[in-house]
Image: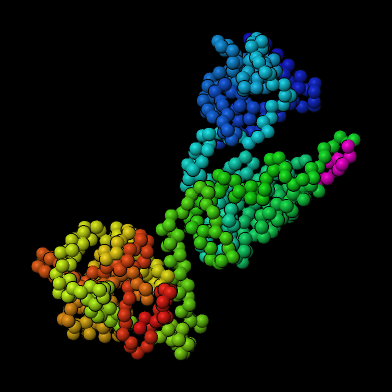
Amino acid sequence: NDSSRKRVHQDFFDQAESNSDKPNTASVGRLLPMSGGMWVHASCALWSSEVWEASGGVVHSMDKARSRGSQLKCFGCGRPGATVGCSKANCSSNYHFPCAKACGSVFTSNQSMFCKSHTSHAVDLVQMASFEQMRPLSFDNQIATDGDQIDECIEKDSFLRIGSLTVHSLGAIDEKLDGFHSKDYITPPGYIATRIFWSICKPKTRTVYVLKVENVQGNAIFSATPGDDPGAEIRGRSADKVYKALLKLVHEANRDHFSHGNMFSKLPMLRNFEKRAYGLNAAQFFGFGINTIRRALETLPDVEAVVTPLSKESPSYEFCFVQPSMDLLMDLQRKRAAVAAEKALENPSGCARTEGHHAVLRSGGSGRITRALVKSAGGDAPTDASDKKTVQEETQADRESNQLKYREMKTVPLEDRLAALRSHIHGWGLFTKVDIKKHGMIIEYMGEVVRQCIADKREKGYEESGIGSCYMFRLDLQRIVDATMIGCMARFMNHCCRPNAYAKVITVDTENGADKKIVVFANRDIAAGEEVTYDYKFPVEDGSLKCTCGAPNCIGRMN
């Protein structure tokens, strides 16, 4: 009945008060975080009937125990939430863990509990006065849903909480900054967290610390501000220095509460070795060294910047949970190379007229590309000196093969095969999305087909209008393909002194009969993601054109 339950519950606290000034609530163990923002004591979880522990401290079936316990009342205190049941068959006794101890229940080494009426069935009893579990513990459902919880927190702009640590902001990765990461950790500027830790002012007292990573003139500055003394902010160039300074101040604040080698003192002894049980390192103290936070940091936008540092001295971060795609890495490398190439041609004064002749020398020549590709494409195909076939025989034999290749190329949409992306050579470039075999067709050079006289008139008009660069390709002696205003991705092909593609005029059957087409072929196997390059073979005009292809045989100019 209720009176007997209240008497048992009161006997438990009376016994605790007889041993100390306060009830012995530490026997239930530390609090462990569950899914859904709930917490449970370690001993209450491990001694529940449905719960079992796997290797590595992973606790399973805690949700089942919580669901069953919400429907049962404790035989000791009469309150709901009893999950510790008697292991004797057909016994319906269920308790809270501290109530089970108070009612005379016994515990065995195989995680079983027997009530006072069935203690004779217990074997290999556990005689420990405290059941604090001195090992790391975690729940299986928490590990399985880490990724979903992180995504949900980021989408809802909410906080991440792990124990006494709360992350308020993960910060933002800036691809233009370097030095905000190491080989093991990502420390983005704007990272803000709070942690409950020992005070540096009051001994044996905890307080809240505000932990930040700030960008000060391009350098990462770590800081820890105690809530009970905001003026005593600790700052440093590394998290390790800040953490060590904090621990030193905590030790000084608690100096009078240690024995300092006095064997007869009642005070505890101060450990002389740095490695402490359940101690935190600097990265874990700030939070970015905890696996859950590391996973969240690896999902931030522009995270590919930490694996492609700006300087050789800066290390590349080694991802643990979420690997960035190769496309993101290559896009960033192309973007940085393009920005560097354009910056090299910038005028310090901001105006080319004030630079005089130096601006021309820096650009490698006049920089004017007139009628960029107006030439015969028939001679671009690689030739074999040992091949004794005549040109007429070779053309006749290849016509059927080219017809099949052309139809096959046209069946696949252009955007599924190629893409125009930023290039380290110059501006935009043409990149493949699929693997292309040697002598395979890449793309057709398309545009307006005009006569020679119209092409000459357009070239002059382009120069007068300030366009400067025109994209024309000779189809035959009478016709020229102009892709300056109307064309396709083929015009984004950059020049390279060691190209991986060549152009050739072929004859294919169309709805209007046989027609000539300018098609770009691969002169070697091209892997997906590579840039398609072509040798412009410019004639020497009024000035040399600078080449920035970076090939081993590059001579520094296009003509």
Left-right relation of 310 to 394 = right
Would you place residue 149 above or below residue 101 in this image? below
Left-right relation of 231 to 439 = right
- Point out the image quarter for the N terminus: top right
Give coordinates of residue 416: x percent, y percent: 29, 58
The quadrant holding residue 46 is top right
Would you place residue 180 above or below residue 485 in this image? above
**Residue beneath the point at 80% across and 23% down:** 19
Would you place residue 358 above or below residue 438 in this image? below
- Point out the image quarter for the C terminus: bottom left
Q: Main secondary structure of the magenta part?
A: loop
Would you place residue 282 above or below residue 444 in this image? above
**Residue beneath the point at 43% across and 62% down:** 330
Kindly tell me whether residue 3 is visible in this rendering: no
Give coordinates of residue 275: x percent, y percent: 72, 45
Q: Which residues are magenta?
A: 253-263
Give coordinates of residue 186: x percent, y percent: 57, 54
